[in-house]
Amino acid sequence: MPPTRLRSRRTVRTLAALLLTGVLSACATTPPVSPSPRVILPTAERNQVVASLKQWQASGQAALSTPKSSEDFGFDWKQSPRHQEFSVYDPLGRTVARITVDPRGAHLQLANGDIRQADTLEALLALVLHVDLPANELPDWMLGLRRGTATEQQNAAGLPEVLRSGPWRIQYLQYAPVGGLTMPKLLQATGPEGITLRLAITQWHMGKPGTP
């Protein structure tokens, strides 16, 4: 039997076994990380599962700096096939801005009640954070996936250690087990004009929002 078919069957059996044992749990928090008897997917299978995720949510803290300014904020990113939502929080946990994207366009609601609209998430993200970030690439950065023209440098486990996409360099500083997946916990992106974005992801949620 060809090796490719053998590998494919082994992958299917592995994923099926993990799903039956509940390894890919709906909710998972990265810290604290404690030893677990559960199986952690090998990198190749991990990448297949993560790339096929339809809905997920990542929450944590961010530090954004330029040569002229710096700010820290909390964030929450929700992703689904027809909906994106990005929320920004102040140090006290109060919502500063919420951006939602659906087939009708992108909408921004500020803390004072003002509402703005644009064609893209990127345009509203720049309005909130005052820098230009590649919004379409941010979900892949958070998931630790290489797509398109990005180049990749891997660590000893075969996971991305450094991604390069255009003028951006994304360095993965720490991973953590989340259910049966190894997910980014701390990453830093540096880009043009001295922009640095550091994300500490403290909670991952795989599946539909609100799923326990």
Image (cartoon, rainbow, N blue to C red):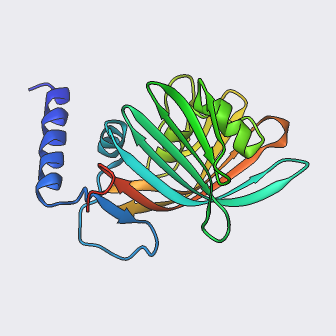
- In percent of width and height, residue 6 lies at 14, 33
138 relative to 6 in the view: left or right:
right
Q: Residue at x 46, y 72 (%)?
A: 31
87 relative to 18 in the view: left or right:
right
113 relative to 52 in the view: left or right:
right
Q: Is residue 86 or residue 31 the one in the foreground? A: 86
Q: Is residue 1 or residue 49 the one in the foreground? A: 49
- In percent of width and height, residue 207 lies at 29, 49
Q: Residue at x 38, y 62 (%)?
A: 177
Which residue is most to the left?
1
- In percent of width and height, residue 175 lies at 49, 59
The mark tally for this picture is 0
8 relative to 170 in the view: left or right:
left
Q: Residue at x 48, y 52 (%)?
A: 156
Is residue 190 visible in the rendered image? The answer is: no
Res 150 quadrant in image: top right
Quadrant housing the N terminus: top left
- In percent of width and height, residue 10 lies at 15, 41
Quadrant housing the C terminus: bottom left
Q: Residue at x 49, y 29 (%)?
A: 147
Res 124 quadrant in image: top right
Is residue 121 visible in the rendered image? The answer is: yes
Please determine whether, in this image, residue 26 is positioned above or below residue 7. below
Which residue is most to the front?
113
